[in-house]
Amino acid sequence: MVTSDSILSTSEFETKGVLSRTLTTRDLLLGGLFAVIAILPYLDVVAAFRSDDVLLIAQGNENSPLGGLLRSMMRPFGDTRSIEFYRPFFTWNFCIESHCFGDRPGSYQLVNFCLQALCSFLAYLFSVRLLGRRAAIFATFLFVLSPWTANNMGWIAGRCTVVATIAMLGVGLLHDRARRLGMALSRAAFVLAFVGVFYRETAFLAPLFALALDVTAGRKLTSSLKPICLYTLPFLIYLVAKKLVLGTVLGGYTSLAVIRGAEGGLFSFSALDFGRAFVRLIGAAPEPFDSTFDNVSLVILALASLAFLFALAKNGWRQPVFWLLTIFALGHGLLLCMADAVVQVGTAQRWHSVVWALTALLGCGLAKMPRAWMSWGLVVIIATLQTHRLRLHLDDYDSSARLSRELAKSINDSVEKQVFIYNLKPYVGAAPFFEIGAGQFALPPFGSGQKSVYPIVLFNAYGADPRISQTPIAAQLLDRGELASVFWIDYESGQVFDFPPSKLRESLAALEEIPRLVMSEPKSEVVVAGSKNRLAFAAVGIERVEIHLVCPVVEIRLSRVRGTERFPQEAETFSEDLEEILSMASHMIRGSKSRAWLWVVAYAANDKERNPMAVSSFIEVELHQERR
């Protein structure tokens, strides 16, 4: 006899109607409870704009909601072609909200709360149908408390994957209900799949969620073929649209792979990288896998592994749902590892739906423990450890927000119109989103726009050496007698300091000691061809080139690794067309803020310390504003 709380309660569902069990008052109330629990840890988080938030909101504010939709459909994500993503509904989202909320980050974050609450509600309903009530309670409870969801809530733009997860869960539930109530709900599932995939492309996995429910219910797959094809159609439409707009289908993920230094492109990650990613997701470790886990992460990992083994021991291999979840988690993780094989707090938002699958597997295992008290005891222990790790992640966001406000005040109090922000340790907790977005409070659309703010990305590998400044533009300006305010962000103390002129001159002196790139034209540091949109230099001995365009709002940094299409293995000269990067910058700045600098850094082979082999001087470039 099949009980209502078993992993596969299919007979009851098929007898009473597909979702009659999940739509009982009890389960709706439990789903609502999980929706509330999902937002409770975030209620005291300090809201702030970070990284893409500022750019997306600023660009969205330029257009009416209708005009913003047309613009979003015809342009790449963030108006940037260096990373060729196409997410028109995501960018349109910020167009609408910027007109509603203006410069109030708390309002945008409230939208994130609502989305996560809805996602948690749907996750419970879907899990009840897929796993049974007991396993669904365990799985959803651990999902809403996962430390990795901090990035989806604390970072406004991190909602992207949450919406994709909502689309996947919603399509599965609508499809399941449609088998009883007809094609109207199938068409609704099609619309949701369309919205999801145009919001974030990973929503193309939605048909798999619908298929999972059919498989676990014992339905014939031939009867699922027509609706599954219907739900796949939006993704095909998306691919056509992306190809027409960007001229590429996989360009965005290929670009990410190259930027992170993957010489082999998309498939350059190893099996060890793949394993590390999942170990970190389960253990929620804050540091890379090759460093020592803290005790919290070790205990989480051990307990999760124990529950997983129990699921296998209890005939888990005979249950389709177990393997469907495993295949989904591994397959989706494989796609993510192609672009970025390292799971860190700064990129955790990409793994939202994978985290759901892992907690669902964990719920299966916990439900199969031999004694109920063991199940509940492990749930309480793991949830407590997760909450501790989640709090640490959120503390990073709070400190980042407070530092942002301190820096904004320093910028506003500065008497100079050029402000440079130097950052010692950009990868501390949630801080990587801060050093790019820092200081943009003084820029349009929410400020007076009287100051040009240049955030400069620095690298931790240089330590306290004067050469820590990879892009010491302010030092050159000081040497030429131009006035600028320079601030130093110290993440250790959580404070902002004025950068003394003496330190700037040390940085300039160290810069002058680095060899200059061997240019193909001796009178120019960067050889200009045609309309000043091309650079070229001798590339013998060079394995990696970084092109920086430093302009107000953001520093654009592109990596070119030997052995890729843009930098062939046999090339003796390096050549780069700057049209795209200059066009990208022109979207990001406004009005009179057209002063920008080009800076090229070359590295030798296998230089893990990131010491420049040679550099160019700063070349001031003119950015032409596009008519909007």
Image: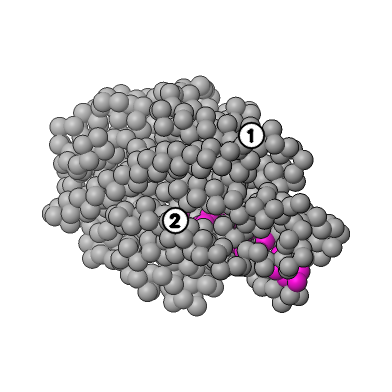
Q: What's under tag 1, amino acid-wise? A: Phe
Q: Is residue 403 magenta?
A: no
Q: Is residue 178 magenta?
A: yes
Numbered disc in front, either 1 or 2: 1
Q: Is residue 433 visible?
A: yes
Q: Residue at x 71, y 51 (%)?
A: 8
Graded by Cα atoms within 10 Å as few (under 14), some (14 to 19) or many (20 or more), the crowding at tag 1 reads many
Residue 185 at what x, y percent from top left? 69, 73
Q: Nearer the viewer, residue 328 or 405?
A: 328
Q: Nearer the viewer, residue 131 or 408?
A: 131
Q: Nearer the viewer, residue 77 or 485?
A: 77
350 vs 3, left or right, is left
Marks counted in the figure total 2
Alpha carbon separation for disc pair 1 and 2: 27 Å
Q: What's under tag 2, amino acid-wise? A: Ala
Name the main secondary structure of what is drawn in magenta. helix
Q: Is residue 526 visible?
A: no
Provide the secondary structure element on which disc 2 rests.
Answer: helix
Q: Which mark is residue 310?
A: 1
Q: Residue at x 33, y 26 (%)?
A: 462
Quadrant position of residue 271: top right
Quadrant position of residue 297: top left
Residue 238 at what x, y percent from top left? 66, 62
Q: Nearer the viewer, residue 379 or 455?
A: 379
Residue 102, above or below 381: below
Q: Bounds of the magenta span?
A: 158-180
Residue 335 at what x, y percent from top left? 63, 43
Give the residue pinned by disc 2. 38
Graded by Cα atoms within 10 Å as few (under 14), some (14 to 19) or many (20 or more), the crowding at tag 2 reads many
Provide the secondary structure element on which disc 1 rests.
Answer: helix
Residue 587 at what x, y percent from top left? 43, 60
263 vs 431, left or right, is right
